[in-house]
Image (cartoon, rainbow, N blue to C red):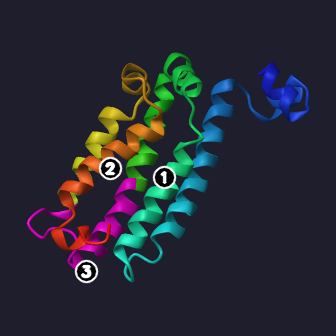
């Protein structure tokens, strides 16, 4: 808290007048971050119905940008200091995956670039399960990966198996 107060140019007392604890500050920062991520993902998937592959690339670029801000010390500290708060992260992340990947994959199905023999809901649940299994503080630390790299690897593994031959042309 000392370092943060110094970086913000305020006293620790002022910081604690707005946030009762480190936990409250972390929760507020995470909720604010998820609002930014959601707005960014919304922009990235806005054109999903007009060009699936462009929207997919935009969504992946957005995720790479947003997750690039998450550094190993933050993941390590969250694992050590606030493992229960990661449940908030998982819940918000699940909501975003369902909303944005669901929209995008649904539009991709209509455009004929997502296989028709695999239900979109199953693709989403597989993606979510893999993300939850891999992109969590313990596993990311164990694998020696950055959260961004873990997330992008999971998406690549899932989607390259889900994109139909038509969708692979030009990609």
Q: Is residue 165 left or right of residue 150?
A: left
Place of residue 61 in the rendered image (x, y in percent of width and height, measured from the top left): 49, 57
Q: Along the horizontal axis of the image, is 52 left or right of 21?
A: left
Residue farthest left in this picture:
117
Calculate the distance from the C-alpha at mark 2 to the C-alpha at mark 3: 20 Å
Residue occupying the far bottom of the picture: 50
Give the mark nearer the N terminus: 2 vs 3: 3
Q: Of label 1 and label 3, which has the lower sequence position?
A: 1
Sequence-wise, the earlier of marks 1 and 2 is 1
Pointers 1 and 2 in contact (C-beta within 8 Å): yes
Magenta highlight range? 97-120
Relative to residue 89, is residue 143 depicted above or below?
above
Residue 54 higher or lower than 97, as above or below: below
- Residue depicted at 52% across the width and 27% down the height: 75
Q: Which residue is mark 3?
A: 111
Task: Place residue 99 in its image quadrant.
Answer: bottom left
Circle 1: element type: helix
Question: Magenta stretch: dominant SS?
Answer: helix
User: Alpha carbon of mark 1 to alpha carbon of mark 3: how far?
Assistant: 23 Å
Around disc 2, counting alpha carbons within 10 Å, would you say few (fewer than 14), some (14 to 19), or many (20 or more)? some
Residue at image location 21% in from the left, 69% down from the top: 114
Instruction: Name the residue rendered at 38%, 54% in the picture.
Output: 97
Q: Which residue is mark 1?
A: 63
Q: Nearer the viewer, residue 21 or 166?
A: 166
Magenta span includes 39: no
Quadrant of residue 3 within the rendered picture: top right
Q: Identify the residue under disc 2.
A: 155
């Amino acid at each position: 808290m000392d370092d943060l107060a110094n970086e913000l140019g305020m006293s620790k007392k002022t910081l604690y007048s707005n946030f009762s604890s480190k936990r409250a500050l972390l929760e507020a920062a995470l909720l604010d971050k998820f609002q930014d991520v959601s707005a960014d993902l919304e922009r990235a998937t806005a054109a999903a119905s007009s060009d699936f592959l462009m929207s997919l690339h935009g969504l992946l670029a957005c995720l790479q940008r947003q997750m690039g801000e998450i550094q190993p010390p933050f993941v390590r500290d969250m694992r050590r200091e606030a493992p229960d708060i990661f449940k908030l992260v998982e819940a918000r992340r699940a909501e975003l995956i369902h909303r944005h990947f669901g929209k995008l994959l649904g539009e991709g199905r209509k455009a004929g670039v997502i296989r028709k023999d695999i239900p979109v809901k199953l693709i989403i649940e597989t993606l979510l399960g893999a993300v939850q299994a891999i992109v969590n503080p313990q596993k990311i630390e164990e694998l020696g990966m950055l959260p961004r790299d873990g997330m992008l690897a999971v998406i690549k593994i899932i989607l390259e198996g889900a994109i139909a031959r038509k969708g692979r042309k030009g990609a």
